[in-house]
Image (cartoon, grey):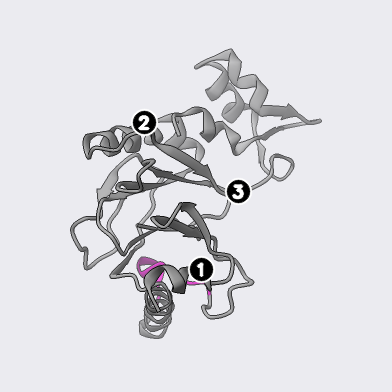
Amino acid sequence: KTHSENLLNAVMEIEFIKDKVYYEIFDRTYTASSGKYAKYKAENAAILAEVQKNIDVIQKEYNAQELVILKQVHGTKILDANTLHKHQEEADGSITTKKNIALGILTADCVPVLLASADGSVIGAAHCGWKSAKNNIISNLYNQMKSCGAKQIKALISPSIQQKSYEVNEKYYQDFICDDVVYKKFFIESLTKFNFSQSFAQIYEPFCFWIL
């Protein structure tokens, strides 16, 4: 089968740029993997082997030359994934212009943001927690994509924690309000604390899988 045929037959896989860019969200319903992808979190050789097996399964299923998984640290660094990396590099975003390179983002509460040029020639992925979003990781990713020739960049905001489940304290709230009172719209006040909406990440120029 061709690469496109393999992707179109995959469960939960979605075409973003016709015949060019595809993405998939892996959750507990994806039974071909145990859900562990972070090598840097492996506590022993057995877990490391399990992680590598999971990565190999996805690479084989999607005919990917490499599955780029980052050591995410809630920063703003963007990794150039055009160069193959032996280790999971410390960064919270990645970009590539090469075919069959898959960009992966690991999330729990945070927002995975996926970007692609309209012609599908450049793709980028970002791990957007509140720190990264507040420090303009999306602007960094957008600008790097533009420097690679990306035009008419489209964005995909993937699932994240719901506001009702994300409780924060007064200090957290004030940290945002001191920057701009408009950020009040992202908070709901409860009896003692606040509930924060991670949709905040969407206002900064915007595990997921993104492949060119």
Q: Residue at x 40, y 35 (%)?
A: 138
Q: Position of residue 59 (x, y in %)?
A: 37, 74
* Mark 3, secondary structure of its residue: loop
- Residue 147: quadrant of the picture: top left
How far apart marks 3 and 1 lie (CA) works out to 25 Å
Please, what is the three-letter code of the amino acid marked with disc 2?
A: Ser
The reply to whether callout 3 and callout 2 are in contact (CB within 8 Å) is no
Q: Name the residue furthest right.
A: 191
Which quadrant of the view contains residue 86? Answer: bottom left
* Residue 8: assigned label: 1
Q: Amino acid at mark 3?
A: Ser
Q: Which residue is mark 3?
A: 160
Residue 49, which numbered label? none
Residue 57, percent from left and from top: 42, 79
Q: Position of residue 61 (x, y in %)?
A: 43, 77
Q: Position of residue 179 (x, y in %)?
A: 50, 17
Q: Quarter holding the C terminus?
A: bottom left
Q: Is residue 60 above or below residue 160?
A: below
Taking the image as shown, residue 180 lies to the left or right of residue 122, namely right
Q: Can you identify the residue that label 2 sits on?
A: 139
Region of the chain picked out in magenta, as a range: 35-43
